[in-house]
Amino acid sequence: MTLNMMMKIVEKSILADTSGVKIVRLEVFFPSVAQKIKPGQFVVVMAAQEGERIPLTVVDKDIAKGTIILIVQEAGFTTRLIGKLNPGDSFYALLGPLGQATPIKRYGKVVLVGGGVGIAEIYPVAKALKEAGNQVEIIVGAKERDLLILERELKAASDRFFVATDNGSYGQRGFTTDILKELLLKKDEKYDLVYAVGPIPMMEKVSLITKDIGIKAIVCLNALMVDGTGMCGCCRVSIGGKTKFSCIDGPDFDAHLVDWQELEARNRIYQEKEKHICNLYKSND
Ligand code: FES
C-alpha cells in the first residue's frame, strides 16, 4: 500500500437524487480509521485545498479492505464539491476518528430515530446496540419515499422498523416524532433509551416527548461542526448550563440538557453564511 492510495475513493454510488436532493455514498480507503473508528465517531474531511473542513459520520467500515463508508447529502458548497469526487479521486485531507463514541451497552429496549441524512448516522449505532443484545426499534423519516436511504441495512439492524414520509408516499404520513410518541405511550411497551439524529426541530421534539414521559434520550449534535478538533469554537453548545464543544465532548449529549433555543440560533447564523458562500460560488461559475 502506498501513501497516495490513502483517502482515495474506491467506490461511489448515488443513493437518492430527487426533488433537488442528492445523497451520495462513498467508500474511501483509509485503513487506520477503518480499524479504530467506533459507532458515533466521525471524521473531518476536506474535498480540496480551497474547500472548508466538514465532519462526516463514518456509517460503516470494512477492516479487511481498509475502507470506510461516508454518506453525504449535497446541501452547500463543500458537500457539492464532495459529491463531484469520483472513484480514483482522493480527499485533500481526512482526519479521524474524532469525537466520543456512543456508549454501547445492554440498555434493554431502545428506539432510534433518524431524520433526513440522520438516517445514515443512526445505522452504526443501531448495529452496535443490536450486537450488544438490545431490542432495537428504528423510526426513520424522509420527505418522500425516494429519499429514504439504507432501508435494507436498517431493517437488518432492528427488530421493528417504522417509516414516516412528509407526503405519505411510504410508511405513515407525518413525522418520526408522531410514531415515537405513539410507541412510547403504549401501555404494554416499556423503552429504556431513545437515540435521535436529524434536523434540530426533530431532535428538540424528541427531547420534549421523552422528557414528558420520563425516558432517557441521547441526541447526536455533530451537524454544527467546522474544524472538528476543538479549535474554532463554532460547535459550542450549552449542556445543562455548561459550555461544551460538540466535536470533543460530543457529538452525543443528553437531549434533556441541551439548550435548544441557543442551538437553533447558532445554526441559523451558519445557514446564512453558507448561503452567502454558495452565492459567491455561483457568481464565479
Ligand atoms: S468544531 Fe471547532 S471547536 Fe468543535
Image (cartoon, rainbow, N blue to C red):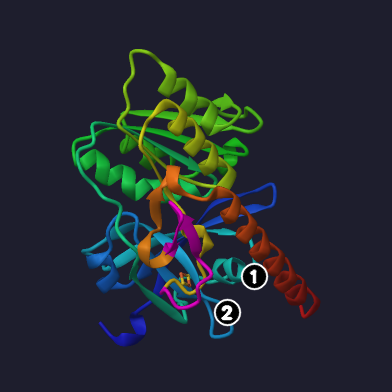
Q: Nearer the viewer, residue 88 or 119?
A: 119
Q: Is residue 199 left or right of residue 41?
A: right
Q: Which residue is mark 1?
A: 77
Tell me whether the residue at label 2 lies in contact with that at label 1, contact meaning CB atoms closer than 8 angstroms: yes
Quarter-of-image position of residue 66: bottom left
Measuring from the top left, give residue 32's x and y in whole percent.
25, 73
Q: Nearer the viewer, residue 104 or 63?
A: 104
Query: The disc labelled 1 sits on which kind of residue?
Result: Phe
Q: Tell me, yes or no, whether the highlighted magenta stretch contains residue 91.
A: no
Disc 1 secondary structure class: helix
Label 1: few (<14), some or many (≥20) within 10 Å? Answer: some
Label 2: few (<14), some or many (≥20) within 10 Å? Answer: some
At a point 67% along the width and 58% down the height, the residue shown is 268
Where does the C terminus fall, quadrant-wise? bottom right
Q: Which residue is mark 2?
A: 51
Q: Tell me, yes or no, whether the highlighted magenta stretch contains residue 237.
A: yes
Q: Which residues are magenta?
A: 229-246
Q: Residue furthest right?
A: 283
Disc 2 secondary structure class: loop
Q: Is residue 51 above or below residue 97?
A: below
Q: Nearer the viewer, residue 11 or 280?
A: 280
Query: The disc labelled 2 sits on which kind of residue?
Result: Gly
Query: Which numbered tag is attached to residue 22?
Result: none
Q: Is residue 254 left or right of residue 102?
A: right
User: Of marks 2 and 1, which one's residue comes earlier in the chain?
Assistant: 2
Measuring from the top left, give residue 237's x and y in whole percent.
49, 59
Measuring from the top left, give residue 270's x and y in whole percent.
64, 65
